[in-house]
Amino acid sequence: APDLAAAAGVLDGDADVARLLASGALLSATRLPEGTQDVVGHALGVLARQPESAARALWIERLHTLTALVTGFATADLATRREELARADSLFEAWTGAASRRHPGKHYAARTPLHERGDRSGEVVGLPAGWGARLQASLASYLELSQLPVLADRMAFRAWYERHYGDDEARPWGEVVRDIDRVGVRYQLATPKRAIELRAALRAYRDALREQVDTHLAEHGAAVPLRLDPERFRALVGDRFAAEAAEDGRAYAAPDMMFIAGPDGAGTPIVGEAHAMPFHEPSLYAASPRRAEVWRAASDFLAELCAPARPGLVCRGRVNFLAWTTDLGQVDLELDGPSQVPHARRASLLELALRQADDGLFDFSVTTHAGDTVAVMPLAHGSRVRLASRVYAVDLLDLAEWLGGGDWRPAWELPRLSWGDLVVHRRRWRVPSEAWAGEGVAPWEAVRRLRDHCGDGLPRFCYTKPPDERKPMIFDWGNPVAVEMALWLAKRHEVLVFTEMLPGPDDLWLGGPDGRHTSELRTVFARQPG
């Protein structure tokens, strides 16, 4: 930083920064000791060991200010969080002479008019009796369905690989990807009979579900939820391909789950969001007193999931000045930026290589920057590497999208759908803005028009967004501020999509001294071979 460079009597340039690093006045993020969790605390310790100086006192004061901001943000309400984040932005720019990469309105907290207060206590909370078993039974069955489309793709990849290469030599993964693109349609021509049968069985099952939904809508309409029977899936598809699914490596999924608390004490599980990795970034728990336990659990789980290889995580460039990752013992596969783990566990993604083993599956390895060849398990979500890796991600099936398939009903025509006890599709409404939010329409008249358009099913609390945006806003139609914001949004978009908010405020099960909390269960499911 310019202030520190001036205090040390050197100019602000690359050579002078190198001198500052060598003198210990600055500490590179790549030199943080392995396992460091409290980065600010570590920096304060480094400064405390240095001789007294104006620069030392200045940066100790600044780090204490930063600590207070982080603590204030973690414990504040929504309005104060915005103030604390804006203050952190301005201080960062003043201290470093650089512009913050975060732009106004880009953080999720700015996208809801509802009051919120986060719980960072780190307390262990147990689910009510029977809820865990109910969740596991429902979700495990749905994951079986979600795995099968990926299984068919993996079977097709192995058949093509054996036909195209026909050996057990190691080769770069990038070369394999280029060959797939080069051969074009011949890749699909290699699909084995069993994979073709699996895809046909899935299409037949989808047609059966479509018929069931059509019958339900004709008899009951969209306002009545529809429960789908997982046992019917097992009878028609699941049991026929259970052996292939059980032998095909280790499939994993990391969905966020929620619960609706029923009046009888029963809990109805709901699919929240599916995440990319077989764990949830432990840095989210940095403010928790139990953070060391969370990091250790994540590290142990990854080691067991990928054994005997090391987990291989794709490392992308840091996207903002607050971004950091936790060292979980992985090998970082650098894509577009340097990793923060020790040098011996860093490698270029271009070094990734695979070899087909005797069991037909594939082993991956990589040469690190230290020159060592290490067996890795690449956990690259959304990449074709999951066609070959023994450990691979399964996205929870978006049932409405899968049923639609471009030639059937859109998602907003469907009722709420449950897979057994598990809610897998919330009811939606797709509404042209001109139908309710015309020029000069009073707020409460607009809400009345919206309810008339959607029918009796539109709830007071909704997730709302334009069709092409990923993250919604939360609206309470009983809140005048929310209504004004909804009208503002409608004037800027021709169509809005409304989704029922589940669970609603009256359905929350987790309580604290300041009321009931919306909560997510960050689950991880892995299917072991056999």
Image (tube, rainbow, N blue to C red):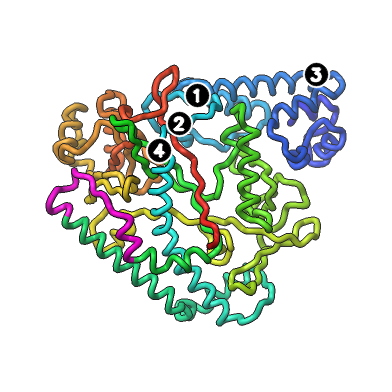
- The residue wearing badge 2 is 109
> In whole angstroms, how far apart are the C-alphas of marks 2 and 3?
37 Å
Numbered badge on residue 54: 3
Q: Quadrant of residue 442?
A: top left
Question: Relative to residue 428, is residue 134 drawn left or right?
Answer: right
Please name whichever residue, 220 or 470, is drawn nearer the observer in this view of the structure. Answer: 220
Q: Which residues are magenta?
A: 216-236
> In whole angstroms, how far apart are the C-alphas of marks 3 and 1?
31 Å
Q: Residue visible at 54% across and 74% down? A: 158
Q: Earlier in the sequence, mark 4 or mark 1?
A: 1
Q: Quadrant of residue 91?
A: top right
Q: Earlier in the sequence, mark 3 or mark 4?
A: 3
Please name whichever residue, 316 or 525, is drawn nearer the observer in this view of the structure. Answer: 525
> In whole angstroms, how far apart are the C-alphas of marks 3 and 4?
58 Å
The quadrant of the image that shows the N terminus is: top right
The secondary element bearing badge 2 is classed as helix
Q: Residue visible at 56% across and 20% down? A: 72
* Circle 3: residue type: Ala
Report x, y in % for residue 115. Answer: 39, 23
* Mark 4 crowd level (few <14, some 14–19, many ≥20, 10 Å Cα): some
- The residue wearing badge 4 is 131
Q: Quadrant of residue 174?
A: bottom right
- The residue wearing badge 1 is 81
* Circle 2: residue type: Ala
Q: Are marks 1 and 2 in contact (CB under 8 Å)?
A: yes
Question: Relative to residue 313, is residue 58 drawn left or right?
Answer: right
Residue 108 in the image: above or below residue 331: above
Residue 335 lies in the magenta-colored region: no
